[in-house]
Image (spheres, rainbow, N blue to C red):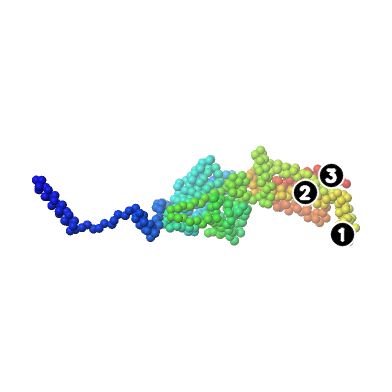
Amino acid sequence: MEKRALIAVVLSLAVFYGYSLLFPPPEKNPVQNPVQVAASSAQLSQSAPPSVSPQPQQPTQKSVAAKDIVVETDMYTAVFTNQGGSLKSLILKKYRETSAPDSAPVSLVAATSPDGFVFRTESSGFGLLPVALYSPSAESLKLTGSEKKQLVFSWTSPQGVSVKKTYSFSGDGYGLALDTQLTNYGPNSVSGKVNLVLPYPSQADQKLSRLETNNAVTLENGSFTTESIKDLVKEPQQYDTKVDWTGYADKYFLTAILSEGNSIASVMINKGSGSYLDTLVASPTFTLLPGHSHQLDYRLFFGPKGLDILKAQGQGLEKALDLGWFSAIAKPLLYTLKFFYKYTHNYGIAIIIITFIIKLVFFPLTHKSYKSMKDMQKIQPKMAELKEKYKNDREAMNRAVMELYRTHKVNPLGGCLPMVVQIPVFFALYKALMFSIELRHAPFMLWITDLSAKDPYYVTPIIMGATMFIQQKMTPSSMDPMQAKMMMALPIVFTFMFLNFPSGLVIYWLVNNVLTIAQQVYINKTVKDA
C-alpha cells in the first residue's frame, strides 16, 4: 500500500510540474516598494486635475405655493410672504392715523403687488429671483415681552446657490434683524453682489398729516442727507461711502435698513416698478467657492421717531429726527418737555412751563432790550432836530448823532442784540414741538384734543394775533410812521400763518406773548421818563 501511495504522489508531482512547464502562467506586474509608489503618485498628481473636496448635499427644493406668514409682537403686526421671503404689510399697534378712537392704525408697509414687497433679494451673479417661492419655517409667529423668535425662508436657485433669509424678532421692540446666507452647492465658483430692495410709494396720500414731510434719508460717512420723494422720482441718488443706514421718513415715523459688519457697500434710490420708488441696498462684491457660504447681516427698523427709541438702535439713527440747524438746543428742550410731562401728564401744561422757564432765563436780556428801545424813543426828538440841522451835511450829522448817543449813554444796537441771541432758542423749540412724536394726538384741554393738529375752531390763533397786536402797541419804537404801520401789519400776517399750525406751537407763542406783555408793563413802570 505504501509503495502504491508513494508512486501516486510521485506521478501527481510529475503531472503538476509537467503541466506548469508546458503551460506557464501570465506574467504579473512586480510589486512596487514604497518609494516607487510615492514617485508614481507624484507623477499622476502632475498630470491629473486637483482633487475636489466632497460637495455638501444640495437641499431638496420643495414645491411650495404662495402663502402669507403673520408675525405679531407687542409693537406691530407684520405680514410676510414667501414670495421672495419679503414683507408685504406692517401695522403699528400703538399709533393711529388720527386722534379719533375708531381711526385706522398707522401702516408703514401696505403692498398690493410684488412691486411693493419689502426686502426682496436680487443679485448679480448668483441667479437670485426677487419673487421666488421660498419655503418658510413657520406658518405664523406670536411673541410678547422679551421673547425672541425667528422666521426662516429658504430657496435654492437653478445654479445651485441656496439662500436662507432669517428674520429675528423681539416681542417688545421696533427693531429686528435680517441675516441672509448664501451657500454654493454648484460645481463652479460664482461671484457677485446681493441687493436688498426697499420700495416706497412715490405718490403718498397727502391727506395724512404725518406725510407733510416725506423724504428718503441716509447716513453716509457720518453725514445725514435727506431728499424729497418728488425730487428722487425725477433724479436718482447714489451713496457709496460708508453707508451706516438708509430708509424713508415721514413727519413722525421711520423705516430703515442698518448696516451690520459693513454689509452695505452702496445705496441707489431711483424710480422702481409701478408706483414705487426703489432703494437698492447693495452688498460688497464677494466670491462663493463650491461648498462655501457667505452671510450678510442687517438690522431693520419700523417705528416712531422718538428720540430715545432711535438712539437705542445705535449707528446714529437718532439723526433721522431732523431738528434743524439748532438741534443741539432742540434736543435738551425736548428732554425737558418729557421731564415735565412725567409730573403733569399733559404736554400742553409742559409747554407752558417751558415757556415760563425760557422767558425767565432771558428776562435780563429782554429787559435790557426794551430799556434800550425806550431810551432810543426818548431821544427821537433831538435826533430829528439834528437831521434837520445837518440835512445837507451827512458826515456832520453822523458825528452829531454819535455824540448824542454818548451823552445819553444809548446803544442803538442794544434793542436788537438781546433779541438776536434768543432767536436760536425760539427756532429750536419750534422744531422740537413741530416734529415731536410725543405731541402727536396728545390732548390739552377743552376743544384742543390733539396738540400736533391745528385748533379746529381757530380760537387760539386769533387770541395769539390779538396779544401780538397789543405787544406791538406797547413796544417802544424809533421807526418812522411808515415803518411803524408795516410792523403793525405783522400780527395779521402771523395770525393767518398760525391758523394751520399745530396747536402746541400756537399755545407756546400765545403764552410767550402774554408774558412779554406782562414784562413790558413791568418795564414801563420801572423805567422813569427822562
Given residues 20 and 238, the one toward you in this image is 20
Task: Name the amino acid, label 1.
Answer: Glu
Task: Single out the mark in the foreground, 2 or 3.
Answer: 2
Task: Give x and y (percent) for residue 225.
Answer: 62, 54
Of mark 3 and mark 1, the one earlier in the sequence is 1
Given residues 235 and 8, the one toward you in this image is 8
Residue under numbered circle 2: 418
Task: Give x and y (percent) for residue 212.
Answer: 63, 53
Determine contact: label 3, label 1, CB under 8 Å.
Answer: no
Given residues 57 and 7, the one toward you in this image is 7
Res 44 quadrant in image? bottom left
Of mark 2 and mark 3, the one earlier in the sequence is 2
Residue under numbered circle 3: 527
Task: Name the amino acid, label 2.
Answer: Pro
- Callout 3 secondary element: loop
Q: In the picture provided, is 124 more to the left or to the right than 472?
A: left
Q: Is residue 238 above or below residue 453?
A: below
Residue, x 18% and y 57% (percent of image)? 21
- Callout 2 secondary element: helix
Mark 1, residues whose alpha carbon is within 10 Å: few (<14), some, or many (≥20)?
A: few
Residue under numbered circle 1: 395
Task: Single out the mark in the foreground, 1 or 2.
Answer: 1
